[in-house]
Amino acid sequence: MELKRQRDALRQYERYLPVLQLKKQQLQMEILRMSALLEEKKSSERRRTAEALSWAGLLADKTVDIRPWVKPVKVFKSSRNVAGTDLPAFERLEFAQADYDLFIAPIWVDAAIEALKVITALREEIRMIESAVAVLRQELRIATQRVNLFEKIKIPEAEEAIRVIKIYMGDQMANAVGRSKIAKRKIEAEESAEVNA
């Protein structure tokens, strides 16, 4: 019974291991892809921020306070599944409608609001990508632990248990054959003693 149980366990481990290895590989590829996307978004955010710094001094003008119009009202996000792991995905931000007097406000206000909205959206997207990468790294750590568990512990343990059981069964069979030969010789000796008597 133990031999059958160990063989079944070994088959199960060997069937499950390729699935875990594939998951590990997919997670690694997705981490690389997301890391490249993160760098691209960070670069874009730095570039946009540097461009905004050239006119940021204009924001000191107290004629119009644009802060309420560049603060997100709602974040739209979705989730996507990668190798059985749900990841947050940025969609867009919703901002309050800019409501100011076009005749009183300086001419740069529209451009400033749009530029700051883009920077805010980029920052939120970067935050979500970083969150997704953290989730992927955690899942990769778990998948790697499981792959190592199966490769280095469970499969070798099952193979060793099967080997030991086979040796034990072989010894038992050899002993049984030896006992049966001894019993046969005793029976033959008793029969020959009866025939001679």
Image (cartoon, grey):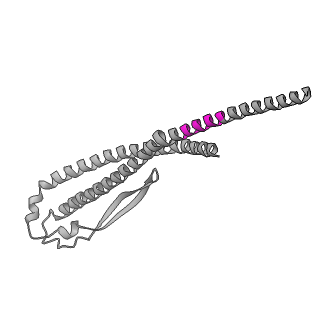
In this rendered view, identify the residue nearer to me: 131 or 59.
131
Q: Which quadrant holds residue 63?
A: bottom left
Measured as percent of width and height from the top left, residue 57 is found at: 8, 59
Looking at the image, residue 130 sits to the left or right of residue 100; the answer is: right
Residue 66 versus residue 6: which sits nearer the camera? Answer: 6
Quarter-of-image position of residue 14: top right
Which range is magenta?
Answer: 158-171
Most foreground residue, 144 or 180: 180
Q: Is residue 13 visible?
A: yes
Residue at the limit of the structure toward the front, as seen here? 197
**Which residue sits at x=32%, y=46%?**
35
> Is 13 drawn above or below residue 134 in the view shown?
above
Q: Is residue 179 above or below residue 122?
A: above
What residue do we see at 35% from left, 43% from top?
Answer: 32
Instruction: Residue 11 in the image: state x and y as whole percent.
Output: 59, 42
Can residue 26 be seen by looking at this rendering? no
Q: Where 135 sits versus 36, above or below? A: below
Residue shown at 46% from the left, 46% from the top: 23
> What is the x, y in percent for residue 180?
76, 33
176 relative position to 141: left or right: right
